[in-house]
Image (spheres, coloured by chain):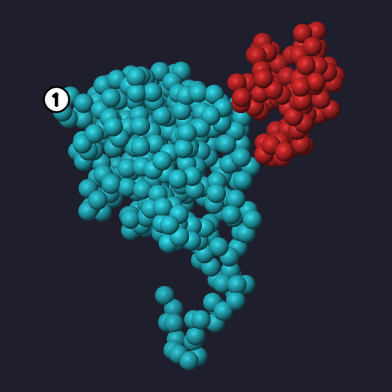
């Protein structure tokens, strides 16, 4: 297991995160294309190359240019699991 | 101090006999909370380059630096200090890149802040990573000029604060820069950004490996920094430096290098009662690391002992390249390390 996977936690709930695998990343992209998610601060969702799921896969912390983004205001919130 | 009494009723070895009593009477402690981890950051993607003169230390691309910061935070390290390795082709005599809001260090700050929003980020304020001559300030007629340099440092500090830096650390040793930077930060809306002043920074030979790491050694060439950094022989002058920086608004003060200057740390702490940091510089790190690689020192014990010595001397926190390693050691075996 990648070290990050072992130590990372949702900054809001402190519960473990789930790193998106290829299938769930593809599902996330489809969900976003379908307009099922928005960034918490209302800004456009940037391009991303990975993601961490939290809170029943309704909250997503994106990995942007190799860097996970755990700024609460910049997380993506979905209407349900992708 | 209490009268230590007389032998044989008094035997100081009694308390040293067992680990439990040694722990109970230990006067100074080291924890991950006392450490700041300096990271060398370079351009590129998902890569790192070892620093030959500093075994175990690498220059990390921004993405790797951000992920490394996550690990450091998870180990209990409160803050990282970011040092940019600038492409030589981008260096200029006046180091204009230092005030570019999209320069390497500002991008690194933003990345680390995204990855670990709670972690403190420290950035040096000085021009040496950005100048072709490797000096910390502007050079006019072969002399590093003070006041004109301070103007640039103010702009550099504001740019770093705007990127998300929590602590600006002027390491340049120009006169009067702390007050000017404080005013500049406040005027730009960054009253909360702290200043860690490299208040007693000596013109030391122990910086050599660092200059290799950031690529400023070739730029500096045979030049030196003795017209602005302190004479290693001086202690009273260090007190005057610290007094000025405290008066100008420094939130924390630093002594650099560390281990050869423990007397300075102690006197600063006793005199001012300020949050006092020490920088275990590259030369100190490399000496212990190289000796360990030869089998002449026990690295784990030597590095922890050296850091405990900083604490004993009065340092509240220590910048050390071994921060992550030591934090791992302390997590695995927090009690009887030295």
- The answer to whether residue B217 is seen in the rendering is yes
Determine the secondary structure under disc 1.
loop
Residue B28 position in % (x across, y down) = 50, 62
- Judging by the rendered image, the residue that carries numbered circle 1 is B141
Residue B123 position in % (x across, y down) = 44, 33
Q: Give the chain letter for cyan.
A: B
* Residue at (41, 59) in percent of width and height: B313
Q: How many numbered marks are there?
A: 1
Please give left or right for residue B145 compared with residue A61 in the image.
left
Q: Colour of chain A?
A: red
Please give left or right for residue A24 compared with residue B61 in the image.
right
In the displayed structure, would residue B169 be above or below residue B8? above
Residue B319 position in % (x across, y down) = 45, 45
Q: Viewer-proximal residue, B210 or B100?
A: B210
- The answer to whether residue B250 is seen in the rendering is no
State which quarter of the image contains the N terminus of chain B: bottom left
Residue projecting furthest to the front: B294
Residue projecting furthest to the top: A34
In the displayed structure, would residue A26 be above or below residue B247? above
Q: Viewer-proximal residue, B249 or B24?
A: B24
* Residue at (33, 58) in percent of width and height: B263
Residue projecting furthest to the bottom: B8
* Residue at (53, 60) in percent of width and height: B29
Quadrant of residue A25 within the rendered picture: top right
In the displayed structure, would residue B17 be above or below residue B258? below
Residue B83 position in % (x across, y down) = 43, 33
In the displayed structure, would residue A18 be above or below residue A38? below
> Label 1 neighbourhood size at 10 Å, few (<14), some (14-19), many (20+)?
few
* Residue at (59, 55) in percent of width and height: B330
Q: Chain of mark 1?
A: B
């Amino acid at each position: 297991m990648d070290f990050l996977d072992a130590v990372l936690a949702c900054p809001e709930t402190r519960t473990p995160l789930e790193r998106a695998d290829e299938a769930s990343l593809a599902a996330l992209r489809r969900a976003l294309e379908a307009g099922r998610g928005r960034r918490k601060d209302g800004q456009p969702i940037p391009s991303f190359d990975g993601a961490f799921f939290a809170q029943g896969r309704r909250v997503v912390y994106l990995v942007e240019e190799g860097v996970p983004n755990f700024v609460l205001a910049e997380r993506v919130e979905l209407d349900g699991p992708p | 101090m209490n009268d230590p009494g007389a032998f044989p009723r008094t035997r100081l070895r009694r308390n040293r006999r067992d680990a439990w009593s040694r722990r109970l009477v230990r006067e100074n402690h080291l924890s991950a909370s006392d450490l700041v981890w300096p990271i060398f950051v370079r351009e590129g993607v998902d890569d790192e380059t070892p620093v030959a003169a500093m075994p175990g230390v690498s220059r990390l691309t921004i993405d790797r630096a951000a992920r490394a910061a996550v690990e450091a935070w998870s180990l209990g390290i409160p803050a990282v200090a970011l040092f940019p390795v600038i492409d030589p082709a981008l260096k200029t005599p006046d180091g204009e890149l230092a005030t570019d809001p999209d320069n390497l260090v500002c991008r690194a700050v933003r990345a680390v802040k995204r990855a670990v929003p709670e972690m403190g980020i420290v950035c040096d304020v000085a021009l040496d990573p950005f100048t072709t001559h490797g000096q910390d300030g502007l050079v006019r007629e072969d002399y590093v000029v003070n006041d004109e340099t301070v103007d640039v440092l103010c702009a550099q500090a504001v740019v770093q604060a705007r990127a998300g830096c929590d602590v600006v650390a002027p390491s340049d040793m120009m006169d009067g820069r702390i007050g000017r930077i404080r005013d500049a930060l406040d005027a730009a809306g960054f009253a909360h950004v702290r200043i860690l002043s490299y208040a007693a920074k000596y013109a030391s030979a122990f910086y050599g490996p660092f200059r290799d790491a950031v690529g400023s050694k070739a730029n500096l060439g045979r030049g030196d920094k003795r017209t602005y950094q302190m004479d290693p022989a001086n202690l009273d002058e260090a007190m005057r430096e610290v007094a000025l920086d405290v008066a100008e608004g420094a939130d924390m003060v630093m002594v650099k290098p560390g281990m050869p200057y423990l007397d300075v740390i102690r006197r600063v702490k006793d005199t001012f009662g300020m949050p006092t940091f020490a920088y275990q510089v590259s030369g100190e790190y490399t000496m212990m690391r190289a000796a360990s690689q030869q089998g002449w020192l026990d690295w784990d014990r030597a590095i922890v002992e050296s850091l405990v010595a900083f604490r004993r001397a009065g340092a509240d926190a220590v910048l050390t390249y071994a921060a992550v390693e030591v934090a791992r050691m302390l997590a695995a075996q927090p009690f009887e390390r030295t």
